[in-house]
Image (tube, rainbow, N blue to C red):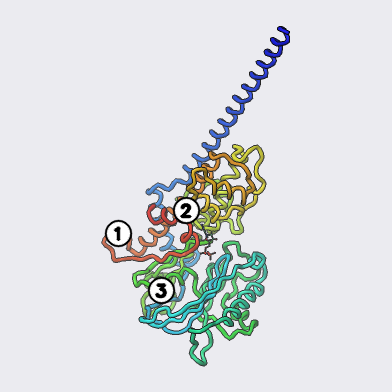
Amino acid sequence: MGKVAIGAAVVCAAAAVAVTALVVRHRMRSAERWARAAAVLRELEEKCATPVEKLWEVADAMTKEMHAGLESEDVSKLKMIISYVDKLPTGDERGLFYALDLGGTNFRALRVQLGGREGRVVRQEAKEVSIPHDLMVGGSDELFDFIASALVEFVDSEGEGFHLHSGRQRELGFTFSFPVKQTSVASGTLIKWTKGFNIDGMVGEDVVSELNKALQRQGLDMKVAALVNDTVGTLAGGRYDDNDVVVAVILGTGTNAAYVERADAIKKWQGPLPGSGEIVINMEWGNFSSSHLPMTEYDNALDVESLNPGDQIYEKLISGMYLGEIVRRVLLRLAVQTALFGDTVPPQLETPFVLRTPVMSAMHHDTSADLKVVRAKLKEFLGISSTSLKARKVVVQICDIVAKRGARLAAAGIVGILKKLGRDGSGMRRTVIAMDGGLYEHYTVFRECLLAP
Ligand SMILES: Nc1ncnc2c1ncn2[C@@H]1O[C@H](COP(=O)(O)OP(=O)(O)O)[C@@H](O)[C@H]1O
């Protein structure tokens, strides 16, 4: 009995030692993994850093590129497109106007009855339709017929309070938020698709004529009276509300900026200068690129694997289409190299664009002590069923680094425009910037960081 007990005790002791050794080894492995995760995070933080000196460099580079883009075509990454809009609203406008806004995942139709300076916006109605993904990469007729048929329904649903002057054809302002070479106020050819659109045979075509043809095919008595970029539209809308608006910036699926330039500062302008002496420039700033931009291996890989490698570099750092995807790439690296989400890499995490920016934003804004929103989103969108609080904190930290880099770079771009306008110093006249876009509107941390970096 004694021997058996001793033997059992010895066995037991040996097992205990083995178990202890296992625990220690696991702890060491876990400590090692966290150390590696911390190193990946540290590196991300360093590479994404945007100290004030760097932001000034980015702002200066933006100003320089603006000058180059106004000088002549094709010398700068900034196209600095002349919009042909030389008059902005004064607030005195009257009548029934229609608008169509196409530039991302949704399009919007709008009708508005303007009642002059006193009446202002008497009445307005809008309709929003999401674009099925297959139409974003299909044929041109299919996309424009889809839009025109939605406009038919919109006009059919017109209620009380909207008055078209008798005998007048319905006129539409077409906001088309892709790079276009404008040829007049109501015509322009597509330069390239961005933001996930890729429709065969459209590059080089007049987008107004494509829409007019579709309106005819659908039997709607309406014609496009003006083609404006969404940023130019935002500038016009901003000016309608406030006379000091001179710049507009969009931060949504993509990003862009427009501003009012002195016509005589546009060296590449040919022909008579407009009477107003001013013209709106559509910068297409999403294509801005500079060696001063803080790029990481994740950004480079995202760019190389994108539909438009080498293009839209600034947009790929700051806009809603890409922020979530950058975060996904960092998380994938952590999952593979440090087993952040357990011993196997969650398969969904390998799917490009599975982590959308609104989901990133929801996780970033999670204020619960145990980060339950992060837990729920990781489960819902990435199929990660169990996470430690520590891992969830890492996720939030990555969102923070990526979002704040984007917001600070966007702010630096705005400063670049103000420098070009000579409105960056103190004691200058009041300058108002019209901001729009879902990213700016809904991503609070991003917006607050942009406003007070
Ligand atoms: N809650 C949110 N948090 C962060 N980003 C958001 C949120 N909601 C929308 N967004 C971003 O805004 C984009 C939509 O922007 P919006 O200006 O409405 O349309 P567009 O697709 O024409 O740019 C989305 O693709 C997304 O990237």
Which residue is label 2 attached to? 406
Image side of residue 343 versus residue 76, left or right = right
Q: Residues within 10 Å of mark 3 (few under 14, many from 20)?
A: many
- Of pointers 3 and 2, the one earlier in the residue sequence: 3
Q: Quadrant of residue 389?
A: top right
The front one of 303 and 174 is 174
- Residue 213 visible in image: yes
Which residue is label 1 attached to? 425
Q: CA distance from mark 3 to mark 2?
A: 29 Å
Q: CA distance from mark 1 to mark 3?
A: 23 Å
Which residue is label 3 attached to? 279
Q: Secondary structure at mark 2?
A: helix
Q: Quadrant of residue 209?
A: bottom right
The spot of residue 308 in percent (x, y) is 59, 59
The spot of residue 318 in percent (x, y) is 49, 55
As drawn, which residue projects farthest toward the left? 427
The spot of residue 215 in percent (x, y) is 61, 81
- The label nearer to you, 3 versus 2, is 2
Q: Secondary structure at mark 1?
A: loop
Q: CA distance from mark 2 to mark 1?
A: 24 Å
Q: Answer above or below: position of 280 versus 152.
A: above
Question: Identity of the amino acid at label 2?
Answer: Gly
- Residue 75 visible in image: no
Question: Identity of the amino acid at label 3?
Answer: Ile
- Of pointers 2 and 1, the one earlier in the residue sequence: 2
